[in-house]
């Protein structure tokens, strides 16, 4: 199938209130990490933050040709590290090593390290510049673009955080060669989300390229990352602080965050997003907002990617509804969702979200639950 856009190797540029930053999607760019860091973060003492898995991969030369000769602070891999405790450990580590206001950070890894390193950068000495070097598909297509940084609290995901855009993003698709299958597939959930909320031809293209995507065909993967980054960059450049259209990028996420928490983080973020998209499409269809058949088409694609499409019955409805009480889009105590109306388009309201009752949520969760 013809690609709907031109293929170019220029960086995608994201603009925000304080300026702009480039997002490079370039095979082999990790080999230029030192040089790019010097260009994007001039005259700074640099510290890298990575999880131990990624740190080991690059130390043993398996993460592309990463060249990095500075200091690295590590955290254990996984969502359990995205906490205030780890934030305290990292900031104490930087203080203990004498990092001052003339420093800058590099977050090398998946979305967990990106969100964490970004939050450390947002808060350390009232804010340091930082670079993101995403090494998972999920972080390349989504998490490293947009300047949202956060840690989780026991009551929910991403509840403590800050908007703090990076100085640049270096995405090297070659780094994905070591990514385990499950992690690769979770990233595809966010790409499907981008297509669903903003770009019908992109959705069609993903559907026809499923086998090449799952083979990790390098040209197809570069195009997928690039298109997702373009969509996210366009939306966040227009609405950095999420007062309007940026909420469309939260499609699937109200339900996803509640599922992650209720599953005690046994569901990966992208797996929860897959389920969240399906549940939210079902709510849209049941309330007459979405075109009939939308949920079936979205679920079929996510299923082809090996993502979960049925909410496990081990997760009680009450835990999910509780989990949605602290969603950041809630207003006057009511759950608000960004609901797709058709492939490529979100139901437009003043804030791009629609109030949903617990009964509507319950009915949709039941329809998408395991038999
Ligand atoms: N800030 C945002 O806008 C935003 C957007 C989407 C998601 N997120 C956040 O991102 C997080 C999920 O990110 P994730 O899915 O990347 O998870 P992750 O960061 O936990 O990475 C997944 C696993 O892959 C390993 N890994 C990373 N790169 C690897 C590589 N190249 N080869 C082999 N293993 C590798 C990691 O060590 C980890 O075990 C969630 O916390 C989510 O809330 C943030
Ligand atoms: Zn997400």
Image (cartoon, rainbow, N blue to C red):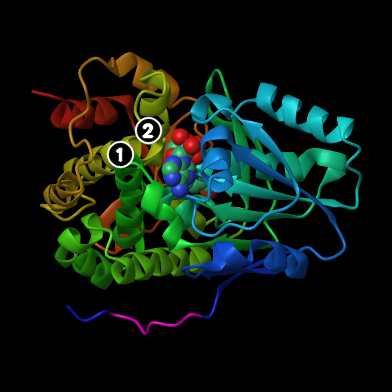
Q: Is residue 51 left or right of residue 317?
A: right
Q: Is residue 8 magenta?
A: yes
Q: Nearer the viewer, residue 32 or 266?
A: 32
Residue 85's spot in the image, x, y percent? 68, 21
Q: Residue at x 33, y 43 (%)?
A: 186
Q: Say if mark 2 contacts mark 1, CB within 8 Å.
A: yes
Q: Is residue 360 left or right of residue 36?
A: left
In which quadrant of the rendered view does residue 1 lie?
bottom left
With respect to residue 180, does 135 lie above or below?
below
**Which segment did they paint magenta?**
4-9
Q: Nearer the viewer, residue 140 or 296?
A: 140
In the image, is the residue at mark 2 within 8 Å of ligand 1 by its beta carbon?
A: yes
With respect to residue 114, does 151 lie above or below?
above
Q: CA distance from mark 2 to mark 1?
A: 9 Å
Residue 155's spot in the image, x, y percent? 53, 19
Q: Nearer the viewer, residue 276 or 244?
A: 276
**Where residue 268 is drawn, which disc sits there?**
2
With respect to residue 52, does 176 lie above or below?
below
| Quadrant that contains the C terminus | top left
Q: Is residue 181 magenta?
A: no
SS at mark 1 in the image: helix
Residue 364 visible somewhere in the drawing? yes
* Residue at image mark 1: 182
Q: Residue at x 55, y 39 (%)?
A: 56
Residue 350 visible somewhere in the drawing? no
Mark 1 is surrounded, within 10 Å at the Cα level, by few (under 14), some (14 to 19) or many (20 or more) other residues, namely: some
Which one is earlier in the sequence, the residue at label 2 or at label 1? 1
Q: Is residue 21 left or right of residue 154?
A: right
What number of labels is visible? Answer: 2
Q: Nearer the viewer, residue 349 or 241?
A: 241
């Amino acid at each position: 199938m013809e690609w709907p856009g031109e293929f170019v190797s220029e960086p995608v540029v994201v603009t925000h209130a304080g300026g702009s930053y480039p997002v490079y999607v370039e095979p082999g760019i990790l080999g230029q990490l030192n040089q790019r860091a010097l260009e994007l973060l001039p005259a700074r003492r640099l510290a890298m933050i990575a999880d131990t898995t990624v740190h080991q991969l690059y130390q043993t030369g398996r993460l592309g040709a990463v060249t990095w000769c500075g200091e690295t602070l590590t955290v254990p891999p996984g969502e359990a590290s995205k906490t205030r405790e780890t934030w305290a450990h990292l900031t104490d580590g930087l203080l203990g090593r004498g990092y001052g206001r003339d420093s800058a950070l590099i977050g090398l890894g998946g979305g967990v390290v990106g969100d964490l390193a970004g939050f450390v950068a947002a808060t350390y000495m009232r804010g340091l510049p930082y670079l993101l070097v995403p090494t998972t598909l999920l972080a390349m297509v989504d998490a490293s673009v947009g300047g949202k940084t956060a840690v989780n609290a026991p009551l929910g995901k991403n509840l403590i955080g800050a908007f703090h855009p990076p100085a640049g993003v270096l995405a090297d698709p070659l780094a994905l060669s070591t990514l385990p299958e499950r992690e690769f597939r979770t990233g595809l959930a966010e790409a499907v989300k981008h297509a669903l909320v903003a770009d019908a031809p992109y959705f069609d293209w993903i559907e026809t390229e499923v086998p090449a995507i799952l083979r990790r065909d390098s040209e197809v993967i570069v195009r997928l990352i690039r298109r997702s980054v373009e969509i996210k960059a366009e939306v966040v450049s227009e609405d950095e602080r999420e007062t309007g259209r940026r909420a469309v990028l939260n499609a699937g996420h109200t339900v996803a965050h509640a599922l992650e928490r209720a599953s005690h983080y046994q569901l990966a973020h992208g797996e929860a997003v897959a389920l969240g998209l399906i549940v939210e499409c079902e709510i849209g269809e049941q309330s007459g907002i979405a075109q009939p058949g939308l949920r079936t088409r979205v679920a079929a694609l996510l299923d082809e990617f090996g993502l979960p499409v049925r909410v496990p019955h081990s997760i009680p409805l009450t835990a999910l509804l509780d989990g949605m009480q602290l969603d950041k889009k809630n207003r006057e105590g009511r759950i608000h969702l960004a609901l797709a109306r058709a492939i490529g388009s979100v139901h437009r309201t003043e804030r791009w979200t629609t109030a949903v009752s617990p009964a509507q949520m319950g009915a949709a969760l039941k329809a998408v639950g395991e038999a």
